[in-house]
Every structure is written in C-alpha cells, then in structure tokens.
Image (cartoon, helix red, strand yellow):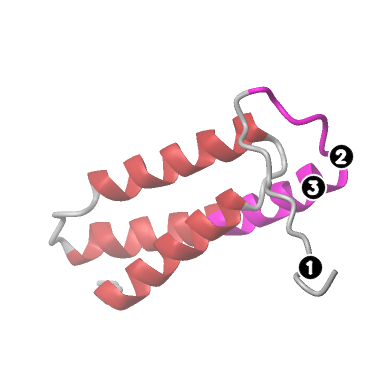
Amino acid sequence: MAAAPTKQSLRHLYHSMLRTSQSFSSYNFREYFVRRTKSTFREIQNETDAAKLAAFYDEQARELAVLKRSAVVNQLYGGWRVAVEKEKPVHERSDN
C-alpha cells in the first residue's frame, strides 16, 4: 500500500504546475494548462483514499515534467501576442 502524499506536498505540486503553466509564451496554451491544472486538482480535492492520492500524485508529477519540457519548447518558438492578451506596462525610470 502506497503512502498518501501530504497536503503540503500536493499543494506544492499544484503551485508548481500553475507556475509552469504560466510560463508558456502562447496565450492559448497558457490559459488551457492553467484551467486544466485547476480542474484536475479540484476533482481530487476531497479524496481521502491513500492509494488514489498516491497514484494521482505520481501521475501529476510525471505530468509536471512533461509540462516543463513543453513550456521550454513553447518559449523557444513563441509567436505573436494575441489581441486578448494584456500588454505589459512600460516602466520608465524615475531618475530621467
């Protein structure tokens, strides 16, 4: 019987997946993976079975590795910004 991951380790995995999802340069990929991560973790939120939690944690840890590799490739070949994306503000130095 596999030991269930702690709530802290699940929370850390969740935040790591969100952070990696936010690193996509493509708006559509970024928004998709953020939505997918939130919905996946929402489904398992009230689970108490240790075996299911351990299997979920292992599967999502593998998914995180794939997500990281995909984000790097997406950053290398990022395209144009989409019209719905917010423009990053241009900061001017105050000593000018």
Q: Please tell me which residue lies in front, 45 or 1.
A: 45
Residue 81 seen in render: yes
Q: Please tell me which residue lies in front, 25 or 52.
A: 25
Label 3: state its secondary structure. helix
Residue at image position (34%, 68%) is 11
Tell me where the magenta segment starts and ends, as one range. Answer: 64-83
Query: Disc 3 versus disc 2: distance between alpha carbons?
Result: 6 Å
Do callouts 1 and 3 mark residues in contact (Cβ within 8 Å)? no
Which amino acid, mark 2? Tyr
Query: Disc 1 versus disc 2: distance between alpha carbons?
Result: 31 Å
Q: Which residue is mark 1?
A: 93
Query: x, y (%) of residue 21?
Result: 57, 49
Which amino acid, mark 1? Arg
The numbered disc on residue 77 is 2
For residue 80: magenta?
yes
Magenta segment's dominant SS is helix
The numbered disc on residue 75 is 3
Do callouts 3 and 2 mark residues in contact (Cβ within 8 Å)? yes
Which amino acid, mark 3? Gln
Residue 62 seen in render: no
